Amino acid sequence: MKILQFAFAGDASNGFLPHHYEGNAVVYTGTHDNDTTVGYFQKAPPAEVAFARRYIPSLGGEIHWDLIRLAYQSVARLAVIPLQDLLDLGSEARMNLPGTGQGNWAWRYRAGSLTPLLASRMRQLVETYGRRGSAAFRPKPLSIPTEQPPAESISQANSDPSP
């Protein structure tokens, strides 16, 4: 589990930075327990913002899209983007604040928020970085035995071994 919002604390050795990923990973811009990407960068320590600017050259007007692109271009097998990040929402759309008992899980997206322009931008990223469900990213099928063991071996396995 790789969370991009954790990537900019520290230096280039931080394991949350995409250049450290291996294919068998899931990358998130943030999770339900984090602030939105916009909210996070509005409150992030200046050193983290400065490092993010060095790491992501395009960092600027659309920080949420910069992190979405970073997730999609990574080698992680899966990229998960919270809807709040796709919609460029700030802290008002945060889903959960750990350790608090009220006000959590209340955010809902508004009808009409999912626009053709948003779909087009996502489609472009999916096509650019090959995340259309190609064989490389499809889960491997489960191996299910087609033959059942003989009935007597099942009953022996389930029998009580005590005398």
Image: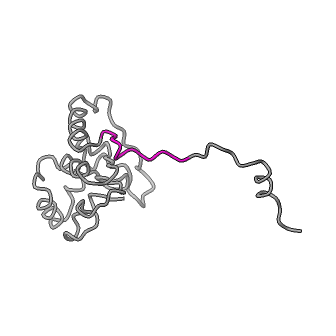
Does the magenta-highlighted stretch encompass residue 22? no
Does the magenta-highlighted stretch encompass residue 134? yes
| Front residue of 100 and 79 | 79
x 19%, y 46%: residue: 65
Main secondary structure of the magenta stretch: loop
Q: Position of residue 64 (x, y in %)?
A: 21, 48
Query: Quarter of the image containing the C terminus?
Result: bottom right
Tell me the quarter of the picture where residue 100 sits: bottom left
Tell me the quarter of the picture where residue 44 sits: bottom left
| Front residue of 115 and 19 | 19
Q: Position of residue 50 (x, y in %)?
A: 12, 63
Seen as rendered, the residue at the extreme right is 163
Q: Position of residue 124 (x, y in %)?
A: 20, 37
Q: Position of residue 61 (x, y in %)?
A: 11, 47
| Front residue of 115 and 14 | 14
Q: How is the image coloured?
A: one colour
x 33%, y 41%: residue: 134
Q: Is residue 146 left or right of residue 127?
A: right
Q: Tell me the magenta residue range.
A: 132-143
x 34%, y 47%: residue: 136
Tell me the quarter of the picture where residue 112 sits: top left
* 116 shown above or below 135: above
Query: Quarter of the image containing the N terminus?
Result: bottom left
Q: How many marks?
A: 0
* 128 shown above or below 11: above
x 58%, y 46%: residue: 144
* 63 shown above or below 111: below
| Front residue of 23 and 97 | 23
